[in-house]
Each structure stands twice: as structure tokens, then as C-alpha cells.
Amino acid sequence: MKLGVMCCLALLLLCGEKQQKKTDSAPLESEKEQVRKRAKFELKDGEVLLFVGQELEAVGGLDEYNDGYLDHFDTPAGWTTYTNINPGENSFGRIMEGLDGLYKTHDWGDNDYNATLQLNDPDYANMALAIGLQFVNHEEKVADGTYDDYINRLADFLLSLGKRPVFFAYSL
């Protein structure tokens, strides 16, 4: 199962767009009129999913962080958070541990992050998660296996979410 999650992560990182299959014959007129089946999370034209984020203080909905978006507005489709695979990196005077902000509270210089704290709160139960994954200047260590432990821990984290939708954005 971990291998499957890691393969999906690799595909997300390597693929920019899904290519459509070509057909040898022209479609029939009745086929043109049919609406194509959308991908699982593909929205209809004009529809949007609202995600809010990303610091605990900005999203709110928690006992200690209670003046954010969730405390004043309807529940959005999801929330965003950040993590990284770049241990030892200095960020705003703090040395990264790797996977910061997933399992415990970390401040990257703008405010606190803690995805597990949010995931364990009922206000977040029906929300998707978008993770900004950073590994700037660490691409070679990710590729050569040096950081496989971090990738495995990230896979475990994702598997622990069950069927909750997770979207990834990454920076290189």
C-alpha cells in the first residue's frame, strides 16, 4: 500500500497533464453530443472549491485558534497546510526537522501549523486537505533515496487519512 502511495506521489510530481487517448476513427455525431465523464474531483465549468489556509490562526475552528475563517463563515471544501522534505534547512531562524507541521505544531515564521491537530477536530471532518510540499534544494536527496524515511512517513500520514481527499502542490 505504501508503494502505491509513493508511486502516486511520484506521478503527481512528474506529470503535468493527463494526456487524452487518440482514436483512429472520427466520433459519431451522437457521441459528440454526449457529455464526457469527468474525473473524480473535476468540476463543471464555472464551479469552484473554496480552500482556506493556511496557518492555524487564519483557519481557526480550534480551541486555541478560534478567530479564523471557520469561526466566522460556512465550512469550506477544504483547508491548506504546508510541510517539507528538507531536514536541516534554515527557515526564518528555525532548523527544519522534515515533515514539519504534520504531526506537531511548528511555526515557519508566519504562524503555527499542525495538520494532525486539525484532522482530529470535528470542525474539519468533512473537509479536503491541500498540502504544499516543499523540498527546495533537496531534489537529489529525494531522488537518490536519502530521504526515503520521510517519504514513507508521509505515505503513512496519507494512508491514515482514509478516504479524505488530499491535493498536493509542490515547490522545487
Image (spheres, rainbow, N blue to C red):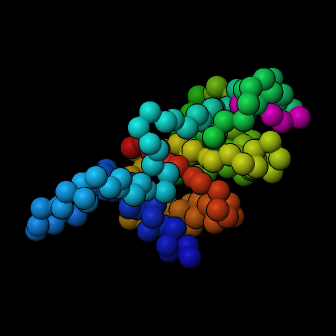
Locate residue 143 relative to residue 90 in the image: left or right.
left
Q: Can you give x and y, in whole percent of width and height, for residue 91 in the image?
A: 56, 33
Q: Is residue 106 visible?
A: no
Q: Nearer the viewer, residue 51 or 54?
A: 51
Q: Nearer the viewer, residue 90 or 49?
A: 49
Locate residue 140 relative to residue 103 in the image: left or right.
left
Residue at position x 78%, y 23% from top?
72
Residue at position x 83%, y 36% from top?
62
Residue at position x 66%, y 36% from top?
76
Locate residue 52 relative to residue 171 in the image: left or right.
right
Is 74 magenta? The answer is: no
Residue at position x 38%, y 61% from top?
11
Q: How many marks?
A: 0
Q: Is residue 125 visible?
A: yes
- In the rendered image of this protein, does residue 103 appear above or below residue 73? below
- In the rendered image of this protein, does residue 140 appear above or below residue 68? below
Q: Residue furthest right?
A: 63
Q: Can you give x and y, in whole percent of width and height, for residue 113 in the image?
A: 69, 38
| Quadrant (top left, top right, bottom left, bottom right) of the C terminus | top left
In magenta, the rendered stretch is: 59-63
Locate residue 55 relative to residue 150 in the image: left or right.
right
Q: Can you give x and y, in whole percent of width and height, for residue 47 in the image?
A: 49, 36
Assign the magenta stretch its main secondary structure.
Answer: loop
- Tell me where residue 157 sits by quadrant: bottom right
Q: Can you give x and y, in whole percent of width and height, for residue 161 in the image?
A: 68, 60
| Quadrant (top left, top right, bottom left, bottom right) of the N terminus | bottom right
